[in-house]
Image (cartoon, rainbow, N blue to C red):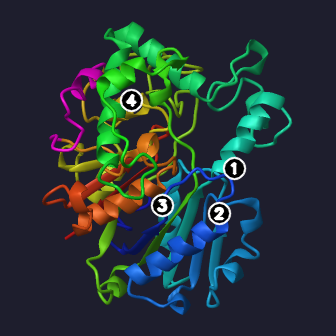
Amino acid sequence: MPDIISLRDRTAIVGVGRTKADRNPDSDSLLHLGRALKAAVEDAGLARDDIDGILVNHVPDEGAMDKLPEMLGLKSITWAFQSWNHGRQQPSLIAVAAMAVSSGLAKRVACLSNGQFFAAQRAHAGIQTGMNPVASEMFREGGGPHLESPAYGLVSIGGGAAMAMRRYLSNYGGAGEKLGAVAVAQRAWAQYNPDAFFCGRPITIDDYRQSPYVVEPLRVLDHCVPGNSAFCLIVTTSEQARDCPKPPVYISGVQGSVSGRERFVFGRTGLGVGQQTEAPYKAPEMPVYRMADVGSNDIQILGCLDAFSPLVPFTLEEFGFCGEGEALDWIQGGRTAPGGEFPINTCGGGLSDVESFGWGHSVDLVRQLRGEAGDAQVPGVRVCQYASLDGSSMILTRR
């Protein structure tokens, strides 16, 4: 068995950049990418020619890898990688960049992604017409990855999350309106993030209760906001990171997505949703903690994939932050909001910043660890985690 700690702290993030979220249908996605790259390079104290590796996740079709480095003015590329057009595997992609610099394939890798409004529009058009290949995966045998079942009229991506939440409430009790704690807390965090789409537009729990249902028990305010924005993180070795002007943020632990009958990206293991077994649940040992030599009790800020608000309490139970059936009560009383004891999604997350599939969360965690989060800064941060219900996770630390 390979040594799981072999990558611990061998690499670091030395530069981050992002653009302000918008929902302008005429927004130029490639311009967003270029600006995010420029900001990250400057943040790292580097020149564009110092970047010799590029990793691309979510980009528009015209940004395919064969032309993108040229379009971005990257002339020194020796290693390039382009992933599937989705972001919940973001920790695995950062790990790929870390392995590239650790093995000497590149010295400094720019990891790029964007949340593109047009991509979401095309996907929803495909859901309605069945003609778009982005949405055609819902027609595969057994249903789509989010439990879409077109033959029975379930074509909303949020439908699967709603079914999981309904099963959770049935199993453990509680009121669906308790989910409002997620939406309200993350909107509060977004007020401190000038790049967030909903900055300047706070909400109250009453606003949440008046929000109309989309697929009960999920309301409009339980859904993420697709939009235009781009993100860049620059990864290098720990040795080279020491030459950069800002404190390195070390990649201390990573684990990838886990597939199988028991896994559902919008529902906690053991709920019995889709093909899952309905069974008592206890969080297993997570490789990400073993690699980083920390436990869930050491995490000071959690970045959590939050395409829909139930993913936050589900992730808290999946990774052992609280026990089975406890998460809805655990998040009440402002516990995850500004000033609370366990901050979650301090950028506003997908619900109030922009749906970035984890990239915006990670940029924010780097800034928190450096002490650069402005009015959102959590004091004394040294250990942060990003986590997704599909099992992918990353732990970032500062020495």
- CB atoms of marks 1 and 2 within 8 Å: yes
Looking at the rendered structure, the kind of residue marked 1 is Phe
Looking at the rendered structure, the kind of residue marked 2 is Ser
Element under disc 3: loop
Task: Evaluate whether residue 100 shows in this view.
Answer: no
Please identify, in this view, whether the residue under mark 4 or under mark 2 is nearer the observer.
2
Q: Earlier in the sequence, mark 1 or mark 2?
A: 2
- CB atoms of marks 4 and 3 within 8 Å: no
Could you tell me how far apart the alpha carbons at marks 4 and 1 are, in whole angstroms? 29 Å
**Residue 126, percent across and down?**
78, 36
Q: Quadrant of the N terminus?
A: bottom left
Label 3 Cα crowd, 10 Å radius (few <14 / some 14-19 / many 20+) = some
Q: Earlier in the sequence, mark 4 or mark 1?
A: 1
Residue picked out by circle 2: 29
Could you tell me how far apart the alpha carbons at marks 4 and 3 are, in whole angstroms? 29 Å
- The numbered dot on residue 20 is 3
Element under disc 1: helix
Residue picked out by circle 1: 118
Label 1 Cα crowd, 10 Å radius (few <14 / some 14-19 / many 20+) = some
**Residue 208, percent across and down?**
38, 24
Numbered range of the magenta stretch:
325-341
